[in-house]
Image (cartoon, rainbow, N blue to C red):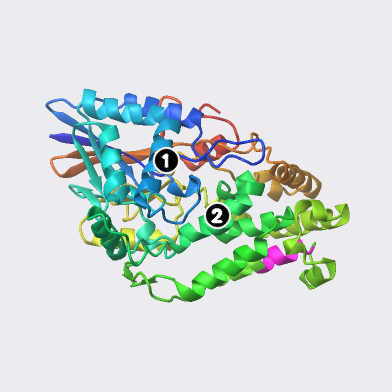
Amino acid sequence: MRTTLYVISDLHLGGAPAGTARPAFQICPPRTQALLARFIDGLPAPDKQNDTRLVIAGDIVDFLAEEPFEPFTGDPDAARAKLASIFVSTAPVWDALRRFVAERDGALTLMLGNHDIELSLPGTRAMFLERLGHGRVEFIYDNEAFTCGPVLIEHGNRFDEWNAVPHGALRRVRSQLSRGLAAKPEFPALPGSRLVVDVMNPLKQQYAFIDLLKPEDAGALPIAAALGAAGVREAWQFFQRFRQSWSVDFDENREPRDAEYIGAPDSAEQDLFDLAENVAAGGDASQIGKVDDLLRAGVQAVTDRVRQARRDALYKAMRGSAAKHRDAFDIGKESEVYLVPARAAVQSGHQVVVYGHTHLAKRIALGAGPSLPLYLNTGTWADLMRMPDAVWDADEAQARARLQAFVADLEGNTLEAWRRAVPTYARIEVDDEVVAGADVFFADGDGHEALTTAGLMRRLEGGGPNG
C-alpha cells in the first residue's frame, strides 16, 4: 500500500492581532489561516490502495505569544485558558483538521516543538485531542521522532542549544500534574523561550518586525539598535547570562549529551552585539557613554543627527553581510547544526530526513546524486521578512535609499511592503517501505510548484506564486 505523507510545521497559531498601542503578536494571521484550512481540506482522502497522512511537525500553536507572557505556562488552568483562546482565534484551522480526521478518515500525526511544549501536559493534551475529534490521530510528545519506512521526521529543536527540551524534567512535571500535585521543582524554562518572553516580546512591543526578519537570533540587534530600540543592551546581557548558565552540550552527531551542560559562547553573537553597539553610537562605539547611553535611549530621545548616523552605520554593516542574508533563503544551503544529525540519520538507514524549526525551507541532497538520500526542511506558515536585495546594489545611492525606506518602515511598524506569507509543505510518497518521491512545495497557487530559491525570493519580494 502506498502512503503519501504531507508534512508541515511551525504554524505558530495564536497571539493577539495588532492593537491601538502595539504591533501584532500574531505571526500566522487570518489570511494565512484561511490558506492553511484550504490546504488541509484539499488533501486527498485515503482509499484502499493509497493512505494519506498529515504530519504537523511541531510549533503547532505558540504559547509564548499568548498573554500573560511566560516562558513556560506550568499552571494547568492557565495553560488550558491559553489553548482555549488559541482555538477561538484560529478556529478555521481546527475545523479543517477535524473534517480531515472525522469526516474523511485522514491520518493525523502531531509532534511537539519548542513553542508548544504545554500541549504535552495532561489537561491541555486532552483539550487538544478532543478538539480534533475521533479518528486516526496520534500525538508524539516524549522526544520521539516519527518514522514511516525510511523517512524520519522531527521538529529539529533538539539540535538547537537554545531550544532543546529537557524531556526528563517535562515528564516529571506531567507525572505530578496528572496526580493533581504542584510541579516542584518548576520546569526549567528553555533559554530560547526566556529569550522570546524576556527580550523579544518587549522589543516587539515597539517593533513588529523583530521575530519575522530572517536570519534571526542576535542578527536583529544591529537593526534594533539603528532604530533606537530600548532594551538592546539588556538583550545582549540576556544572551551572555544564558551562555554562562545554560547551554546544551552535543556530541559529534549534534545529539544532545546533557540538557543542563554549560557550553562555549558563540563568537558570532558577540560580533553582532559589538556591531549593534557601533550602530547605536552612529558608527563610533566609543561615543556611547558621551550621548547618554544611546542603547538605553528610546527612539524619541535622540536627535536627527544621531538617527542619521545610525542609519549610515547600519548601511556599512549590511554591505558587509550580503552572503549571510542571501544564504538564509538559498534552499540548497543549511547550517551544519542540522546537516550533521541529518547525515547521521542517513548513515543509520533513513533515506529522507525532515526537520522544521528554522522557518527556512530547504531541499538538500545528502548523497552523490540529486535524489535520495535527502534532507528537507518544511519551512513555516508564519510570516517572513528579509532585507531587500537593493541594499547590496552596486549603485550606492540607490542602495542607501532602499535601506532608508526599509528602516523607516520598520520604525513606523509599516510592514505591509515587506511582510510575506510563504507557506510550504513536504510531500513524500512511500510505497511498500520504499521512497517513491520526496520534495518540498509551495502551498500557495495550485500547491504543486516545487520549492526553488528563485520562487522563494520572488514571493518574499512580493511577486506571489505567478511572478
Q: Quadrant of residue 427?
A: top left
> Can residue 126 be seen here?
yes
Identify which amino acid the numbered label 1 is placed on.
Leu
Identify which residue, 92 or 21, lies in the foreground: 21
> The N terminus is located in which quarter?
top left
Q: Give the residue at x 61% y 56%.
A: 220
Q: Quadrant of residue 88?
A: top left
Determine whether the residue tagged by mark 2 lies in a helix, strand or loop.
loop
> Can residue 268 be seen here?
no
* Percent coordinates x, y for residue 362 in the rendering: 42, 47
Which SS does the magenta portion mostly show?
helix
Determine whether the residue tagged by mark 1 lies in a helix, strand or loop.
loop
The magenta region covers: 274-281
Q: Earlier in the sequence, mark 2 or mark 1?
A: 1
Question: Per the image, is 27 magenta?
Answer: no
* Percent coordinates x, y for residue 174 in the rendering: 27, 56
* Percent coordinates x, y for residue 298 in the rendering: 75, 55
> The C terminus is located in which quarter?
top right
Mark number displayed over residue 216: 2
Q: Give the residue at x 38% y 55%.
A: 74
Question: Per the image, is 275 magenta?
Answer: yes
Q: Residues within 10 Å of mark 1 (few under 14, many from 20)?
A: many
Circle nearer the viewer, 2 or 1: 1
Q: Residues within 10 Å of mark 2 (few under 14, many from 20)?
A: some
Q: Which residue is mark 1?
A: 11
Identify which amino acid the numbered label 2 is placed on.
Glu
Q: Give the residue at x 83% y 53%.
A: 308
* Percent coordinates x, y for residue 8 in the rendering: 36, 40
Q: Is 436 on the left-hand or right-hand side of 423?
A: left
Residue 393, above or below 226: above
